[in-house]
Amino acid sequence: MSRLVSFSESEQILLAISDVWQRAVNDHVPKKSWHLVLKPTFALNDDMHEWGRWTGGMRRLMEIKTQLVLDHPWYAVVDVVLHETAHQLVELFAPYCDEPPHGDRFKWFCSLLGANPTASGDYPPLDMQIFTEDESEDASPIALRIRKLMALSKSPNENEAKMALMKARELMAKHNMGYMERPEISKNTENFVSITAGRPIERITLEYYYLANILKDFYNVNVIWISVPTSFNPLTWGHALEISGKPLDVRIASYTYDFLINYVTMAWENLPADVRRTGGVRRRRDFAIGVYSAFHETLAAQNRRPEMEALVKVEHPELDAYYAKRYPRIRNIHSNARKVDEDARQAGEELGRKLRIPRGLENGGNGRKMLD
């Protein structure tokens, strides 16, 4: 059961929701039409059945279920807000459209916004879609095997964990599972989702760019750093890595992100105390860069194996098209080069190279939904 929300906290939540709506309009509606898209009244609703609801006409009300904000990640809230925004745009720009509420015109506006046409009603929130285990009889045997491997990736034994992650990636490539997972999503023409990985961070330091590139280069996903709320009382913002791709692809990429963050933390803490004290935060950053660089090399070597080389796809035009719709105004930012502590980087690389994976792996293992 969701906790009660104070009036001041409710105000801050609605400000964050309003920000999602405003960004969607600014990014996807032509500037000459901005004056036509009037901002709705936003409200939290504790009792409604749907996760979100649009009421048009003179009311112009967008309601979001309070439980969605309190019990689910912010990306699940964004998923519903974009869905309801598509309803608003249909009413505004196609008022005489004689179609069902979720007809073709509505789906077109969802495509414009990068929104999910099913993100309301009885639709499970996006985090449940991606991470809830499904052991039903009609589930794909390969999908079930990958889920078990992902459970192994939470093991405190780093060798067992990395073996599971690498084997899962190999299975995903072999069976092209990103295009088969979750039939309720994969039947849609826009067969992609966007989630954020891990916990938000205050500042994007250099090692996080190395980590993001691992996911982009080897896990069939596109990535971008975005702003997300970290608290609603008061409203504060941080940074999170958004991952876009097929449902299973983003799931495995998310687990990989968690695994590598945790591995660096564990490996750093196992170094002698005097080594960790010397150089402080920068030395730890450079150590992490070394780990991620070596892991990048390991994955590149995996791609060069004959059995993987034929499976790995370099181009992803459908994903690129989805990403371009979601972020039509994106621009690349190039940062200045930073001096790196070579001793710390090399120490990290030595540990990172130990992440090489044997060919065979037994199934099994149980674990919680996310890495700790």
Image (tube, rainbow, N blue to C red):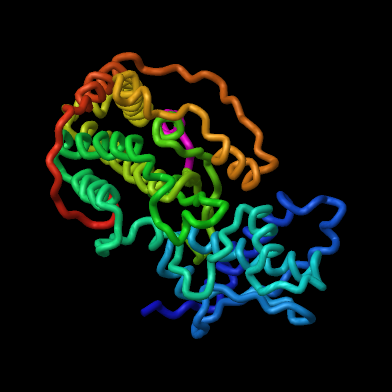
- Residue that extends furthest to the top in the rendered view of this protein: 342
The answer to which of 369 and 238 lies nearer the viewer is 369
Which residue is painted at 48% across and 68% down in the image?
Answer: 69
Left or right: 347 as drawn, with respect to 122: left
User: Is residue 245 visible in this depiction of the protein?
Assistant: yes
Up-down: is 138 above or below 228? below
Q: Position of residue 90 (x, y in %)?
A: 74, 66
Q: Position of residue 101 (x, y in %)?
A: 66, 73
Residue stretch in magenta: 202-212
Which residue is painted at 64% across and 54% down in the image?
Answer: 111
Up-down: is 365 above or below 204? below
Which residue is painted at 50% across and 51% down in the image?
Answer: 193
Q: Position of residue 289 (x, y in %)?
A: 36, 25
Left or right: 37 as drawn, with respect to 261: right
Left or right: 78 as drawn, with respect to 179: right
Q: Position of residue 232 (x, y in %)?
A: 51, 65
Q: How many marks?
A: 0
Q: Residue 264 is drawn in which quadrant?
A: top left
Q: Is residue 211 magenta?
A: yes
Instruction: Give the prevailing secondary structure in the magenta stretch.
Output: helix
The answer to which of 82 and 286 lies nearer the viewer is 82
Left or right: 173 as drawn, with respect to 117: left
The answer to which of 18 and 274 lies nearer the viewer is 18
Up-down: is 146 above or below 2? above
The quadrant the N terminus occupies is bottom left
- Residue that extends furthest to the bottom in the rendered view of this protein: 47
User: Is residue 197 visible in this depiction of the protein?
Assistant: no
The answer to which of 240 and 33 lies nearer the viewer is 33
Q: Residue 335 is drawn in which quadrant?
A: top right
Q: Is residue 45 magenta?
A: no
